[in-house]
Amino acid sequence: MQWFEVDKQGLAKLLERKGKSFALFELIQNAWDENTSTVDVGLDRIPGTRRVRLVVEDDNPDGFANLAHAFTLFADSSKKGDAGKRGRFNLGEKMTLALCDEAEIASTKGAVMFTEAGRVNRRVKRERGSRFEGILKMTDEEMRECAEAVRRLIPPDGIETKFNSQVIPARVSLAEFEATLPTEIADADGVLRRTQRKTVVRVFDPKPGETAMIYEMGIPVVETGDRWHVDIQQKVPVSFDRDNCPPAYLAKVRALVLEHMQSCLSAEDANATWVRDAIQRHGDELSGAAVERVMDLRFGEKRVAFDPSDPEANHRAVAEGYQLVYGAQLSKQEWDAARRAGAIIPAGQVTPSPKPYSDDPNADPLKVVPEAKWTPAIHAVANYAMRIGERLLGCPVSVTIASDVTWPFAATYGTGRLAFNLGRLGHTWFERGDMAEINDLLLHEFAHHFSMNHLDAAYYEAISRLGGKMVKLALDEPGLFVLGADRGASRAA
Ligand SMILES: Nc1ncnc2c1ncn2[C@@H]1O[C@H](COP(=O)(O)OP(=O)(O)O)[C@@H](O)[C@H]1O
Ligand SMILES: [Mg+2]
């Protein structure tokens, strides 16, 4: 005694939402799963009726191994154990039959007729191949949809597939590569299990008007809307409805396509969901080159990461024509991938702001020239700087003489501390005692008392303000501007 009865009418109603083209796909994929070299599909209106005749005929010499599987739902499909075949649920043929008012399946071991009265076995046997013929209701619109769906197929090499006597053209792939992807294979108990398996992946340009899809061995299964069709040459872990796959699987496929198609990417791709999804979920599996390529397309080749630890570096980068990439422009995973690939470097490392030695914890210890080793010319400039600095800024200024030729700045200023870099300025600069040069440097450094950022309004306003003040000071107290004046004064005292 059977546990289940199937309400064919009820099943047919449930299937309505899938559209009718799936019926053709189920029959075609069954034929493709066999040792077939030609498959003929016909879909014709029966004149003067709302019905059509759907015929799918193949030339597989063996025909059905077990004709009862044509009408037994969920019997153990022999294809479950073979990742290279499309079938597994032992459901498709029955779903197609559910749509039919009448049908006949004829194969090498016999034939079955399905009519309103029920199912009858017929004793006719075909020499070779199997033929499905079904009569079902279809509107003109549904017929068009079926014809269009069939054109989306990518027939496997070596199986000529015709629709209404016209060969469905083969497609030339843009790329083909091997990859390990999740698939489903039955274990010894016939239970379908997820497993990883190496397979071939083919990438195709969608034809005009087509939406990109994931294909399972030539049968479109999941609509992606990505840039390319991707045809996977093994079972795709599809849902029972065969029209969806897990998001993680989709992301994995997208990552593989991104990796292998990186040279063909456009700026639009780089910003598209599929590329972001690939990096988001599989950024760690992508090559540095692929991540770099995406970032090139998204932000241009001249780019730096916004660097909160060095605000001025960001301004400098922009002034030098870099594109600043802010934190919120990429997800955490995208940043991780970009960092791993060294694809977006912080502005502070590309266009660093000059830093006073003392403020930079990463800098080498300051190579300081002790005061005992200062030359008279250095003393004169240092004293002048302290004297003028205190008058301009209204607070004491200390002077350090550093000597480091590798340090790229002539001087720095930070919170009352001025450092001259003898390594850059050279002794002659001090000897020369050129007031124009010295004041130029001092105004630049003292303005940092008000802002560290050269591109900040507060900074350049400070320079002009200090310049004005300096001129007034020079007019009022010219003696302050004599280099070595203090030395003379102290000697006198
Ligand atoms: N054209 C065909 N040639 C040979 N065998 C077929 C053909 N169509 C269907 N079959 C057999 O009928 C079974 C049922 O098909 P189907 O319901 O689509 O289930 P599935 O493809 O998932 O196994 C298949 O497993 C296969 O053994
Ligand atoms: Mg099938």
Image (cartoon, rainbow, N blue to C red):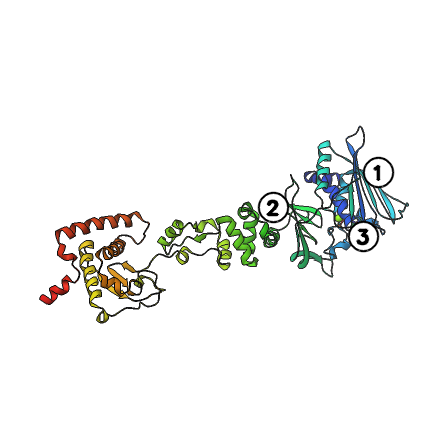
Q: Is residue 467 left or right of residue 274?
A: left
Q: Name the element at disc 3.
A: loop
Give the Cα distance between marks 2 and 1: 49 Å
- Type of amino acid under label 3: Asn
Say above or below: 185 vs 222: below
Characterize the local packing of mark 2: few (<14), some (14-19) or many (20 or more) Cα atoms within 10 angstroms.
many
Residue furthest toward the bottom? 372
Say which residue label 2 marks: 227
| The label number, if any, that marks residue 117 in the structure image | 1
Q: Where does the image place residue 174, in percent across and percent down from the top left?
A: 66, 49
Q: Earlier in the sequence, mark 3 or mark 2?
A: 3
Give the Cα distance between marks 1 and 3: 33 Å
Q: Residue at x 32, y 66 (%)?
A: 404
- Type of amino acid under label 2: Arg
- Type of amino acid under label 1: Ala
Say which residue label 3 marks: 35
Q: Is residue 393 left or right of residue 402?
A: left
Q: Name the element at disc 2.
A: loop
Q: Can I make out residue 470 in this image?
A: yes
